[in-house]
Amino acid sequence: MDSKKHRFNYKGEFSLESGRSIQGFHLTYTTIGKISDAKDNVVWIFQAMTANSNPAEWWPGMVGEGKFFDPEKYFIICVNTPGSCYGSVGPLDIDPKTNEPYYRSFPFFTPLDMAKGYEILRKHLGIEEIFLGIGSSLGGQQLIAWAAMLPELFKHIVPISTNAFQSPWGRAFNASQRMCIEADPSWYENRPDGGMEGMKVARAVALLSYRSYDTYEKTQQDSKESIEHFKSESYQRYQGEKLGKRFNAYSYYMLSKSLDSHHLGRGLFEAEELLQRIKSKCLVIGITSDLLFPVNEQQFLAAHVPGAKLEVIESIYGHDGFLLEDNTITTLLENFIEKK
C-alpha cells in the first residue's frame, strides 16, 4: 500500500478563535494511494481525538486494499490534529517566544481553527475539490466546520457520531477528565511526562462515555463467585496504562478543550444558517448507544444540511461503534456513494 508521511510547515502568524495567535505551525499528514490526473478522487479522513494521521492503522476495517477506502481507487489524506503528539504542532513543541516547550500554555485550536489550517494545506497541495470528507467525534466536528466554511469544497460529506456544537453533557465529561489530570501534582511541573498518572485516570473516565452498559455486559462479566478484582476494574486500569504508553497529558488536555470549544454558530450566523449553506451531498451517521454524541445531535445535522440523509446504526459499542461497525458503515457508504 502506497502510504507516505509528510510534514507541512506554515511560517506566518495564525490567528485563533480564542483571540490568541501562534507564530507558525506544522502539520504532519499521511497520504495513501495516488491522486488521479483529474484530481477527482481525493478522500479526506479526519481523525478522532487520540489517533494518528494514518487511518489504515486505526480504521483497518475501512482503509486499505479491498476495503471501502481502497488506495487503488482513492487518494486518501489524513492530517494529525493540531494539539496532538503524533507530529503536528502540539504542547511539547518549542514556543518561539520563550524557546521552551509550550506545555500548559499551548494555544489550543478549535475545530474551526483546525479547518482553517487544513485549508492552507489544501491550497498548498493544489487540490480544488475533495470527493469525500469523513470523520467522527472531533474529526466530524472538523469536517462540519470546514464544509460550512467552504460550502462547495466537498462533493460528499459523511459526519459520524458528531455535532454542530458541543453539548453541556459532553463538556462535563471532558471537564471531569481534565480535573483528573489537574489532580496529578506533576501536571504543574512542565516536564514531558507531567500529569501522566492523572491522564490514565482521565482515560478510564472517558471510556465510560465511549462504550455503553451493554458493551460491559457482553465483555466484562465476572463469575458470580467474584467479590473483588473484577474484570471491568482491570479493564479500566488497562486502558489508562495503554494510552499512557503512546500519549501525553498535555495533548490529551488540550484536545479535550478543542472538543469543548466547538460551536458552528459562533460569530455572525447561527449554526442552522451555516449548515443550510452546505452544498455537499451529505450522509449523517449516528449510533443508537452513543452516550457522548447521542442521535439527536446527528438528527440536528441532517435536519439542516439540505438534502442530507440520516442513518442510525444499532450497536452495543457506544461511541466507539464508528471504529467497530465496519461492515455496516461500508454498506451505508456503498449505498450513498456507489449506488446513488
Image (tube, helix red, strand yellow):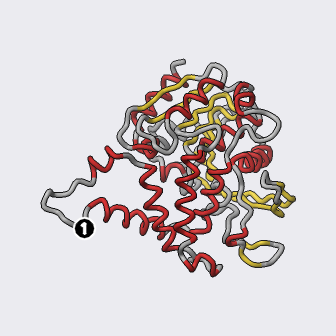
**Residue at the (73%, 69%) spot, across then down:** 105
Label 1 sits on what residue type? His
Q: Which residue is at the front of the view, 141 or 24?
A: 141
Q: Where residue 159 sits: x, y (%)?
A: 58, 36
Residue 64 as seen in the image, left or right of residue 227: right
Residue 34 as seen in the image, left or right of residue 126: left
Q: Where residue 335 sits: x, y (%)?
A: 49, 23
**Residue at the (32%, 63%) spot, across then down:** 233
Count the numbered circles shown.
1
Question: In this picture, is 318 found above or below 221?
Answer: above
Question: In this picture, is 336 found above or below 226?
Answer: above
Residue 205 as seen in the image, left or right of residue 39: left
**Residue at the (54%, 18%) spot, across then down:** 340
Q: Where residue 216 sits: x, y (%)?
A: 31, 50
Q: Can the viewer see residue 37?
A: no
Residue 22 as seen in the image, left or right of residue 91: right
Q: Where residue 28 sits: x, y (%)?
A: 67, 58
**Residue at the (68%, 65%) spot, across then down:** 90
